Structure formats: C-alpha cells, structure tokens
Amino acid sequence: MKLWTRREDARLLTGHGRYVADLVVPGCLDAAFVRSRVAHGLIREVDCSAAREVPGVVGAWSAADLSELPVCANEAAHLQDLPPVPRTMLAKLSTEDAVNGREWPSLAKDRVRYAGEAVAVVLGEDRYRAEDGAAEVTYRIDPLPAVVTPAAGAADSVSLFDGLSNVAFRGTAGEPIEEVVWRRAAAVVEARYRQQLLLPTPMECRTILAVPEDGRLTVWSGHQMPHRLRLELAKSLGWPAERVRVVVPDTGGAFGSKSATFPEYVAVVFLAVKLGRPVRWIEDRMESMSVATRGRGQDQRVRLAADEDGRLLAYELEIDADVGAYPHLGVGLPMQTAWMATGPYMTPRVHATVRSVLTNTMVTYPYRGAGRPEATAALERSMDVLARRLGLDPAELRRRNLIPPESFPYQTPTGRRYDSGNYAAALELALETIGYDAWRAEQARRRARPDALPLGIGLACYVERSGGEPGGLHDFAGVEADEDGAIIAHCGAASSGQSHETTFPALVARTLGVDEYRVRLVEGDTDAQPEGLGSFASRSAQVDGAALQNAALLFAERARERAAELWGVPVEEVEWSGGTLYPVRDGSAGMDLTELVKATGPLRVHERFESGMGFPFGAHAAVAEIDTELGVVRVLRLVAVDDSGVVLDPAVVRGQAFGSAVQGIGQALYEGIPYGEDGVPLMANGLLDYLVPTASEIPPIEIKDTCTPSPSTPLGAKGAGESGCIGSPAAIVNAVADALQIADPDLLQMPLTPDVVWRAARAPKYEEA
Amino acid sequence: MNITLTVNGDDYPLDVEPRRVLADALREDCGLTGTHLGCEHGVCGACTVLVDGEAVRACLMLAVQCDGAAVRTVEGLAGPDGEPHPLQRAFSAEHALQCGFCTPGFLMIAAGALESIGDDPELVDRLVESNICRCTGYEPIRRAIMRAATDCPPASDRSPTSEGS
C-alpha cells in the first residue's frame, strides 16, 4: 500500500509544510498596519513619532511620511512615493471609466473610505514589536456619513469621491423585454433577493514576504496568480518584470480571495525595496475579517414569466451590486451573474442589468462561485415560486424547461454559448438519490398533522462557467526531461489545496505511458515558469490540465524526432511507448528517454494552450425541517449532483464538491457580515460572530456526478470545485420556503438565521394552487 | 523569563517575554512551524497542541505557563523510526486534508483522545466539532479519526498488520 494518498500529504501531515509564515529569513522585519476605526472620514493627522521610540520598532510611516522619505543609498533611491494599488482590468471586469479618479491608495492619505483601511505602517524586529509600535500611532479623522448599502450609495447623497457618482459601473446582458410579454403571461413572479456579503475565510490569512537581494526582489506569497502578482508589483516599482520573482509555497486555502495585489502588499514591497531589508506581513484573523476581500453582495429584483403550461417566456434580473469602497475587479464581477442569468433553461427572452455601487465597506472580490451563486439563487428561488403559482411540482416545471442535450452548443439570450450538457439527467439523478417522491409523501403526512415539524424539499438546477473569460482562457505548460531521465511538468497554475502536485504528474504520466513517480510538478515560481495565468475560475484541470496533456503529447513527438535524427530514419518509423523509443522496422530493444537525453541533450517543450469556456452544471436537492418555535433549520439531507466533464481524480473532485457544499450551507444558514450604520462591521468576537460551519452543522451530504465531456479541450474537463457554493444555497432556501409555505418570497433572505426563520414561520402562507 | 519547554521529548531552554504565546515560542523559538495560527483568538483550533497530554489552543496559552511541561506537536506524531502515526495515515487515506493548514490542529486534538474513542465513538464528533476546516467539510476528517481509532488499539497491544483497508 502506498504510504500517502497525495504527494502533498507527506509534508502537510508531518508539520513540514512550508507556508509563508514558516519561512525563516534572517533579519526579516514584521509589518503591522494601523487601521482606521471609522468607515468614512477625512484624515486630519497621523502621528507616528511615539511609535518610532518603541524598542524594536525599525520605522513607522503614514502615507504622507512615505512621500517624504530621505533618499536611500540603495537601488530604490528613485522611488519617491508609495504607489497606489495597481489597477486591474483583468478579463475586462473593471474598466478605465470605473477606476479613473477613484484610485485606491496603499495607505490612506486624505480620506478613509472603509473601516480598517490602513493609515500607517509600522515595521518591527518581530510582530510583537511591530504591534507595540502600531499601538502608539495616533490619528485624527473627522467622520463623514457612511454609505453602507447599494441603495444608499446609488442615491448619491454622500459621495465617496467628490464630484463622482457612487455608481461606478453599469452593464447589461440580453435585450430589454417588452411589457406585452409580461402582460400576456399566465403567471409572473416578482421578487427581491439579497445575496449577502460573505468572508471567504481561508484558514491561512493573507501573507507576503519580500526579500530584496542583488538588485532583484523575491516575493513569497500564498497566492493564486503568481505571474499577475509579479507583473503588478514590478509595475508599481517601475521595474521590468524579470527583476521580481514570485514564489508561492504551500497556500492555506484561497477560495478566490488570494489573487490580487492588495494595498498591504504594495506597502510591504515598497518598504522592503526602500530599506533594502526583508519585510513580511502575516495577516491575522481579526485583520482579515475587517479588511480582506468580501464575496457576493447583490441586491436583486427579478421578474419571471411563464405560460399556462409552465413554459418560461421571459426572465428579467436587475442587480444593484455592493462593490465596496474602491472600484477594483469586483466592479465588473456582477456581469458574471448577468451573463449567466439564463441558467439551464430555454427561456427565449432574458435581460439582466447591473449597477455597481460604491459603499464604505471593504472591496468586493471573487469568492468561490463568483457571480454564479447569485445567478443561480435568483433564478432557482423564482422557479419554485413560479411552480407554486402554476400548481406544478417544482421538479416538473424544471423538466419542461431544461435545455435538452441535443441543443448544444446552446446560445443563450445573455451572450453565453454553453458547450455541452445533459441537464435533465443531473436533475433526475438528484431526485432519485434524495428519494424525492418519498419525501413529498412525508411532507404530505406532516402537513396533515398540526403538531409535526414542517418539512420542505428544495431543488436547484445550475449551470456555471469555468476557465475564465475570453483573453484569459489560456495558460502555459511545459514538460521536460533532464539528464537523469526524470520528467518535470511545469504549468502556470498555483495550488491552494487542490492537489495539483498529485493529479498533474499523474495526468502527464498517463499521457506519456510512464510510471507516475517518474514525473514531478513545478508550479508557483515565476523563475521556473516564465509565463502563467494561475488558478481561478475553476480552471486548473480544464485549462492547465489540457495544456499539460498537450505539452506531454508534443514532448513525446519531439523525442521521436530526436531519435529519428539520431538513427537516421524517418520520424514515422520511431515509436514512443512507455518512455522508450523504438525503431518500428528493426525490432531492436529501443532507447529509453534517459539515454536519448544523454545522447542528445535536455529535452523541453513549453507551450501556450488556449481552452474554450467550460460550462459545468448539476442539480442539488435539499430536505429541511423547521423548528418554528426556535426558528432553527435542520437540513436532513443534501444531495449534490455535479457534472464537471472528464475528471482527473474522482476523489479529489469529490472532496472539492463536498467542501464547497459546506460553504454553500454556510451562505444559506449562517454566514453574513452585519454592518452598523456607521459602516463598521459588527464582528468584535471574530469567528464567534462570523459563523463558518463547524462539524456540528453538517447534514448527511451525498455527492454524485454525471459526465458530459466538454468539447472545449481534447481533455474534456470542465471546472470543478465551486458547485456547492452555486447549487446548495438555493436548494436549501427553497426547502425552507417549501416547508413554511410563505406567500412572500422576499421574507426569506440569507443567511436564514433563527430570527429570519422565526419571523417567516409567522408570515402569511400561500394558497395551494 | 528563562523557561524550558520539553517539546516532543527535546528540551528547549528559552528566554521569553511573559506575554509570548506558546504558539509563537514553538514556531519562532523552537523552529517547529507545523503548529499553525489560524485565528489567534482560540476559535479555529489550528494551533492545537498537547500539553502534558491535554489538548490546548497554543494561541491562548503563554509559553511561560508551559515551563517544565511536556509539549507534543505535529512534528512529534510519527514514531521514532519515522513511521507515520495511524492518524497521519488515516488522514491521507480519507482525503481528510486539502490545503493542510488546519490539519495539524485536527491531528493533535485527535491524538490526545484517540485511545478513548474505542469506548466512546461519539467522542469523534465532539473532537471534530472543536476545530474549523474550510476545505473538506469535516466528513473526511471524521472518517479518518474513526479509521485511526479502529486501526490503533491501545499502544500496549498494537499489531503491525492492521494498516490499510
């Protein structure tokens, strides 16, 4: 028996993992940030003088101090002022129009726009000294009224940026729907939904360690996109990218939240270069809870129309997105919701509009699911309301409208071209797995007994998008053999817990027909892999996997060419089999790759590979009973059927599906960030206030899959890992709504806390159609 | 203050400030970085270690409180010959870790109670409920601890043949 199931396990289970905070660099300084306690205000004074007197403090600076640094005698002497947070136009998710005049400073200089925004940075010989110093920094901020909700922001009565609207971005997908369509429909559902703000909460908070050496800078960071970080930091420093090396060691989870260049990263790198000393920032949890990026944050208004047979006629989705204090990548992220608004149905008319509104809260950014959970929740909740309105079983309403397998590729009214799918098969498997009919019978029994706890069954069908957007659907991968015959695979991805080190070598080995352990993976080091995009949008298997497969095939091809040249035969007469090259004609023993490389030199293939978009899909089903006295939701059963196309490692994908389902439960029932009217998050007790699910909140969950290969790459993989966040929240909320039979869907807004549920249980119920 | 921590059987004479938490002493002063800090306010349990056999949050305990105590960390789980602990094997077999950051805490909280599970299977639930994992959804961790408890009878009568499945 193999000792370790995954290669990562050997170090991660023995305490020998290397996360950024574990790296030892002699003379390294720790950074601590002084953070604003008010959400919106004008900075009158920041005084770091007392901090500089604290033993062990090496320096303390406000933003103003960092534009007046004495000239240093090192290579950074030209750096005059602390650069701002780099602009991000990635995948056109943000725009020049949105960002112009709304720059995000790395340290706030004149005005703070969210609680926790850093106004000063202190460097100490260790974290204790740095925090001692930070405690001595004083500041005076004159408060301004805080804008806490998108509605308040859009009213523009308080502007975050003088002379500019708080509405930073507008977008649409699909064509406007004429009024006559709604008038003639047999049923029209109207509802408002809140997709609450969430904290991604990886167990390792953000980390950066910057080490200047020999005119270069090495940056260690737990990160999803090392090459982007390198490029953005180099630009900030005015350096060519080659002078910066980014290395991603072990990363303790990310869930979308570790792909940017954050303000603290700019400050740390700037100071490291300016002082010529290693500097690190290891974010702590309380810091993370106030100033790490948040996910979701949409106020939605929907209209969904159907004819008397339950055929969908039109769907309209209006989104007011809360994008936080500065327009960053999250400003265009709600377009993902708009583009995916059509969902898995053949609705002929779909129109989605987005208004991205600035508020005095920390910036919104992708979090596992990133736009697709919001699309799924709005549509799937409305489908259940519609079913009730029409007197149809919710499963039957979905059956009548799912895009059939023969319709792919399917062009949606909101601009997506779905690659492949068998949506009905996923739904039927979910119904069968959960025992749908039996639960409906149990529900009927309970409804006949006034003392029984109400029970509901909720469904959610979803289709999502993986791989990235046009312009960002590629990555770089390579396969090489060195002189001892070891095969090294390279790619631009970066793992934060997704088992790349195990699954990618296995894929390359399978493609080459060699032993798995002959291949090892190198990723997450910009010196070892000159170009790369990274791991986001569930793209690692779909894009990097396909890129590695492609590189491996080319590698075998190059090896055959080499052998052909060596032997003086046509390449068609050389065969690659199991890492050995054989001359087809003379039947001799053949030459192992190791010998070939010894004879002809190292062999390396490095290729850019482009994928199409993938559209994973599935159906989730939940059964819940409600304690109406306590307002407690008990999820009795959760079934997730996902289709990720061709799967590289079923156990790894199942683990991702299970983990994301639990995050979906978190959104449905527990997680949320309460803000005071002053814009300060009410989470003084940290993880006792922000309730990520613990083991005691986990119902029986069953994960199943169907397999519809994607035609977008020869590998056929679609993205995996975000499904639970996308499908499960809507299924759970639908189960609660079904149990309570509430007439007004707007009463159930996530998270379904006891307070929300207790009130909903006392609200008017709908009439059975 | 001068103290001596005995970690995984080795003595570490240290000169620490009274405010220094055990986790920092282990990580920075003893160089044992397998103990991770996930929240620094005692909720997540990533920093769980055993002090005189009892599971504690190393972020809430001061190093000076452990003067003379025996501390066991994830680095001390494997046998003297490097043979992995049954928990380490079971976590790997059950995919009970993904990013691995919370893992040392779960391993140690389970290690402190493993031999009691045979008499009280529900103890596994209470152990898993003690800490936070954001990747796995806990079920694989629960399975791994059960598996290790089954594979790991009390040390006195442990047989070498009960590995795997």
Image (tube, coloured by chain):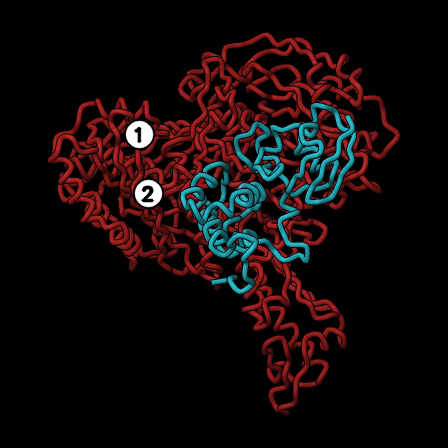
Chain colours: A red, B cyan
Q: Residues within 10 Å of mark 2 (few under 14, many from 20)?
A: many
Q: Is residue A166 above or below residue B55?
A: above
Question: How far across and down, in percent of the image, does residue B145 sit?
Answer: 48, 49
* Residue toward you, B13 or A441: B13
Q: Residue at x 60, y 11 (%)?
A: A42
SS category of the residue bearing label 1: strand
The quadrant of the picture occupied by the C terminus of chain A is: top left
Question: Residue A655 placed where, x, y %?
Answer: 46, 51
Picture coordinates of residue A323, whole percent (x, y): 48, 27
Which residue occupies the extreme right position in the image? A73
**Residue A732 versus residue A723: which sits nearer the camera?**
A732
Which residue is at the far front? B156
Numbered disc 2: secondary structure: loop
Query: Between disc 2 and disc 1, whose residue precedes?
Result: 2
How far, Cα to Cα, is label 2 from label 1? Answer: 33 Å
* Residue type, label 2: Thr
Identify the image quadrant of residue A59: top right
Name the chain under label 2. A
List the residue tagged with mark 1.
A632
Residue under the point 54% across and 31% down: A293
Q: Label 1 sits on what residue type?
A: Val
* Looking at the image, residue A769 lies above or below residue A105: below
Pinpoint residue A20: horizontal percent, then vertical percent.
67, 40
- Is A518 left, or right, of A731 in this rendering? right
- The answer to whether B143 appears left or right of B86 in the picture is left
Write down the residue under mark 2.
A342
